Amino acid sequence: MLTLGPGAPFRWLAAGWRDLRAHPGIGLFYGLCFWLMAITLATVFRSKPEYTLSLASGCLLVGPFLALGLYEVSCRREQGLRPELGASLTCWDAHLRSMGMLVLVLVVLELLWGRASLVVFAVFFNTGMPTSTGVIKAVFNPENWEFVAVYLSMGGLFAMLVFSTAVVSLPMILDRDTDAISAAITSIRVVLSHPGVMLLWGLLITVLIGVALLPWGLGLILIGPLLGHASWHAYRASVQWLEAAAEPDASVSPSA
């Protein structure tokens, strides 16, 4: 485990940008995948506004798995190897068991998130589920502050759980072929050890994705691969293995 400085998330983004510039073709491919994912999820949930936060969790759930190939590209660059699109597309096949278990954990969180969203709407809108327009009116209506507070608090709780479980677990499985439980525990430990830095990292991800969604989600073509590459560097800056004493960047310093 390493100690992170407050500027670490910005260094991860800078390193991710260098990776993206070095291999723009691969980044464009994955960026289009992120965009198609967002369009698909938006279409599926368009008539179900009560699942709006579940849509957000769907992005949190699917996004890191789509970014596996980007982790592979950053990893190969770090090792001085030439990244290839074909290799990035098949990098997961040697880790099926661990990734399958992690998928199960995250899917359970996703289902709980969706059910919780439905319950909140059922409690505050007992006359029936509102339309998409009704949801917007409800959110901006000062009289519904209790609904907004509960809805956002519940969404924030599940977002924190998903983020804490996945922030370094997938890159760790790809890098070290660890089991899903060990990877998830390590990921949670990283968040608990550096709450301020990880909160900033989570906020940066949220803001960048929010900006990327306007207009029509086209910004994901750039922001998606940037965050994918940056997430690999977040893992490498947060977790250091004893036999791989890589030189940490200026934003980190070794700790016991």
Image: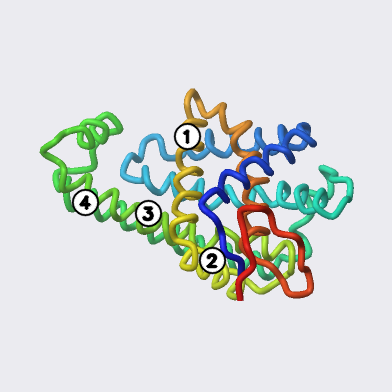
**Residue matched to label 3:** 114
State if disc 3 and disc 4 touch (CB < 8 Å).
no
Report how far apart the C-alphas of labels 4 and 1 lie in the structure: 23 Å
State if disc 3 and disc 1 touch (CB < 8 Å).
no
Which of 25/35 is in front?
A: 25
Q: Earlier in the sequence, mark 3 or mark 2?
A: 3
Kind of residue at badge 4: Ala
Secondary structure at badge 4 equals: helix
In the picture, the disc for residue 122 is 4
**Residue matched to label 1:** 43
**Residue 164, relative to residue 84: is it above or below?**
below
Q: Earlier in the sequence, mark 4 or mark 1?
A: 1
**Residue matched to label 2:** 190
Q: Nearer the viewer, mark 3 or mark 2?
A: 2
Report how far apart the C-alphas of labels 4 and 2 lie in the structure: 36 Å
Quadrant containing the C terminus is bottom right
Residue 144: x and y, percent? Answer: 15, 41
Report how far apart the C-alphas of labels 1 and 3 lie in the structure: 16 Å
Q: Earlier in the sequence, mark 4 or mark 3?
A: 3
Report how far apart the C-alphas of labels 3 and 2 lie in the structure: 27 Å
Kind of residue at badge 2: Val
**Residue 225, relative to residue 72: is it above or below?**
above
At a point 30% along the width and 55% down the height, the residue shown is 154
Which of 98/2 is in front?
A: 2
At a point 62% along the width and 51% down the height, the residue shown is 231
Kind of residue at badge 1: Thr
Q: Earlier in the sequence, mark 4 or mark 2?
A: 4
Q: Nearer the viewer, mark 4 or mark 2?
A: 2
Secondary structure at badge 3 equals: helix
